[in-house]
Image (tube, coloured by chain):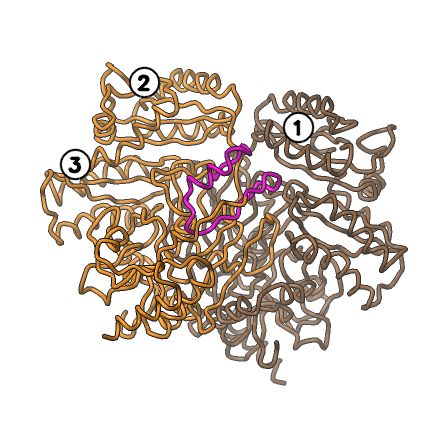
Chain colours: A brown, B orange
């Protein structure tokens, strides 16, 4: 059979251990964090940049589509194969063997990291130098995946997204030469015209396979302090952010807001009485983190007094950071256990967060009256995870799913100038929104760029929208 | 005459006032900040995005090259026409009429600004809200120019470069449709795949003409405090940066190091006794700025005591910020007055700054024994302006210029993993270094991208290296 011969060729190019085809071996690579697994004929695991190049050359020769995969912790569906039948099954390129000890430079405050290396390994290597890659999220992604999805996270308010930390990457494109773009540098001032690196950030592997990443590291603060607080209302939560930025901006590290529904699910998951103990559960609550010197907690307590005296908050409690974040990180699993969850990762200008919440609740109720909107997110940046929870066991039929998409994402984009993807990036889950919210001129330019990097269309999830297929609009 | 008819067509498209052809009118647009003016048949001044589009369409029809120009304060030579004879003279597109009151949003901490609006106007509009675009430099550039050159500056150590502040741009490309790419957004969490905006940042107008910019603003600190200090030696200057980052990172805003030659020129220019008064003039000095709350000066004094007790510095004096920066900003003019200056804007990993300074002095001395190296720059980021000063009135012949290029830029790039352009960007002055330090595969991809955005090659300075001319290597 044709495909078998092709896989044999791959084995001869990369060695036996590099190519997996057994059903059990494959399942680990084909199951997404959320959603339905899709089929793949093989998983190939290159061990260095030359092997990545060999794989890309092989894919070009045989017109086989490659699906690059990091730690498979993405939430937009771009790292696992599509369901059977939708497209020819792609070959998964796992980058997990591109993993070696990160090269941390404590004087330049940088690290060069292989694409398959996990964030936790980088931070373990950086720790003895008092350094960290300050991108904070629940999962433990690979550095290559963080580039491909332009990871944001809970501390983006202070530290920015992955794009802000990437100094340069090495990547393999799928042009006729399988060009290795090598822009690795530890320089911060390196203003030398076109940065191809930017083209690999946030583009889900559709323009090249990242093999190495050089990042700018931050300093670990001497201390952190956290509090949970109850804003008077949603507008007061917004005013609280502004006051904190104005008067305590150098300490403010994160500001997360949870709906009552989200906090309740988190507390159930943690299994204690919650951050506010026996006091009444709030309808809206916020987690704030200050970081800096040893005085951080003292400054935070002063800030809470300040907020209380201005009647912006009705209650506040200082909670040790690990415990404080445990509630925040338990939200997703807690909701998952409470029903059927549809996750929406949207953003609006933060000034519009209070009316947006109200409008989304109305819009969802009109589509699915039995649904609960359990929203939570990074209010400091305008990011809000609008998780819609339906009773456990309910099957969400396609028309309802589409109507809920419209109720949440459509409301964010059309009524509030918001975004269909705040931080998860683009994948088959939200590719349609990219197409409908991007001008035809821009889409045509993107298709032209895709043609430069990948003229045969062998790179990335087949559900990504960047290639202009003949006959598509 | 053909050209006259074409210019007439431009007048009929945009109106009389939009097209300048008189020699006196033109001179303001053809003289660079440094270097030799070049000829242009006309300066066209579109007043809105539709007029920019009309100009690009006109240029495509007649195969005339357009040279976008902001405030003409760039230092890489990309904003004024090349010397007569080198290339067909381009038409200058001045964006100065794309200037209107910036739209500042104090809650979202953003501003939408027209490309021709100056940084000073933006900051005047942001001031009442306690906001600022925290990119600090001697000139007063336009926002479009800041995008096109990816401006860095003296506070990049804390605030990053222009790329970090741009949320999205609107730009006109020169593809067959003269596509208007509109990625204006005030969203911070907007992770929606390919960002064409990135392709207009730092690329000197070669891929599109930016008409509008949306930026993320920072908060103006309540207070600033500055000191001039004398590091024990170059290695101690580096250790000082590390200590300040480690223990005072939340206050550190800038760290500039000046050679004796640079400080002497600055003090002569300011016309007083200098920051250290009657004390001996140092061989190396540093300007440090802390910013934050009212306690900033107190914290700075504590930091200076700390540095003194560790013998990293031999002297320090707190100087009011305006006076402190006056010396720093007087360096360029002061040197200009002391002889014939060749400016080199390079960077190396900051860990390599001390040996790099020594090597550059050796290399320059072997080429031009009468030259003085007056280096100064942004040590916190590894940026260093290696200005080479020759006796006044000396004409620098081309072979000496080439040899000095090699002595400074060549040393930075080849021996220290440095950059030929730290912050000024790419223009005809350093285009050759782009070609020689960029791999052929990457250059080929860049040429492919240029083909997508500007297939006829009508955009940007003709000395930019991104187009693959038939027969070039």
- The quarter of the image holding the C terminus of chain B is bottom left
Which contiguous range is marked in magenta?
B104-133
The picture quadrant where one finds residue B118 is top left
User: Where does label 2 land, which residue?
Assistant: B314
The chain identifier of the residue carrying mark 1 reads: A
User: Where does label 1 land, which residue?
Assistant: A225
Tag 2's secondary structure? Answer: strand
The question of residue B118 being in magenta is answered with yes
The chain identifier of the residue carrying mark 3 reads: B
The chain identifier of the residue carrying mark 2 reads: B
Q: Position of B372 compared to A244: left or right?
A: left
Q: Position of A355 compared to B264: left or right?
A: right
**Which of A323/B157 is in front?**
B157
Dot label at residue B372? 3
The question of residue A219 being in magenta is answered with no
Residue A432 rendering spot, x and y as whole percentages: 67, 67
Residue B312 rendering spot, x and y as whole percentages: 36, 22
Residue B156 rendering spot, x and y as whole percentages: 43, 39
Question: Spatial distance from mark 2 to mark 1, Cα to Cα?
Answer: 37 Å
- The quarter of the image holding the N terminus of chain B is bottom left
Residue A370 rendering spot, x and y as whole percentages: 90, 55
Residue A80 appearing in the image: no
Mark 1 neighbour class, 10 Å CA radius: few under 14, some 14 to 19, many 20 or more: many
**Which of A37/B325 is in front?**
B325
Mark 3 neighbour class, 10 Å CA radius: few under 14, some 14 to 19, many 20 or more: some
The residue sitting at 74% across, 46% down in the picture is A355
């Amino acid at each position: 059979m044709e495909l078998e011969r092709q896989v044999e060729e791959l084995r001869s190019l990369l060695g036996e251990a590099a190519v997996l085809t057994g059903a059990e071996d494959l399942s680990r690579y084909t199951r997404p964090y959320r959603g339905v697994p899709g089929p793949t004929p093989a998983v190939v695991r290159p061990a260095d940049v030359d092997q990545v190049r060999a794989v890309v050359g092989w894919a070009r020769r045989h017109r086989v589509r490659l699906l690059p995969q990091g730690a498979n912790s993405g939430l937009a569906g771009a790292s696992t194969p599509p369901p059977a039948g939708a497209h020819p099954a792609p070959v998964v390129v796992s980058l997990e063997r591109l993993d070696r000890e990160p090269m941390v430079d404590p004087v330049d405050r940088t690290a060069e990291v292989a694409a398959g290396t996990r964030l936790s390994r980088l931070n373990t290597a950086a720790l003895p130098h008092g350094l960290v890659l300050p991108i904070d999220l629940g999962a433990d992604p690979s550095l290559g995946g963080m580039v491909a999805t332009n990871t944001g996270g809970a501390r983006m308010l202070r530290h920015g997204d992955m794009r802000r930390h990437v100094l340069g990457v090495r990547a393999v494109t799928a042009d006729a030469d399988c060009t290795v773009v090598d822009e690795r540098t530890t320089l911060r001032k390196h203003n030398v015209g076109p940065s191809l690196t930017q083209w690999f950030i946030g583009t889900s592997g559709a323009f090249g396979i990242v093999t190495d990443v050089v990042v700018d590291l931050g300093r670990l603060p001497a201390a952190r302090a956290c509090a949970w607080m109850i804003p008077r209302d949603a507008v007061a939560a917004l005013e609280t952010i502004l006051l904190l930025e104005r008067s305590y901006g150098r300490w403010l590290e994160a500001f997360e807001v949870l709906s009552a529904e989200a906090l309740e699910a988190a507390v159930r998951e943690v299994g204690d009485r919650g951050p506010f103990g026996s006091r009444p559960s709030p309808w809206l609550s916020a987690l704030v983190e200050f970081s800096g010197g040893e005085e951080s907690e003292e400054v935070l307590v002063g800030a809470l007094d300040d907020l209380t005296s201005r009647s912006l908050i009705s209650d506040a409690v200082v909670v040790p950071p690990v415990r404080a974040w445990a509630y925040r990180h338990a939200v997703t699993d807690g909701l998952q256990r409470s029903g059927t969850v549809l996750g929406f990762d949207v953003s609006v200008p933060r000034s519009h967060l209070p009316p947006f919440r109200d409008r989304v609740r109305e819009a969802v109720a009109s589509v699915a009256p039995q649904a609960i909107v359990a929203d939570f997110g990074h209010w400091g940046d305008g990011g809000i995870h609008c998780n819609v929870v339906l009773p456990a066991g309910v099957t969400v039929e396609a028309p309802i799913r589409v109507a809920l998409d419209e109720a949440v994402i459509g409301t964010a984009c059309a009524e509030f100038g918001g975004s269909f993807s705040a931080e998860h990036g683009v994948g088959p889950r939200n590719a349609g929104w990219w197409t409908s919210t991007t001008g035809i001129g821009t889409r045509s330019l993107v298709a032209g760029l895709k043609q430069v990097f990948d003229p045969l269309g062998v790179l990335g999830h087949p559900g990504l929208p960047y290639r202009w297929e003949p006959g598509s609009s």
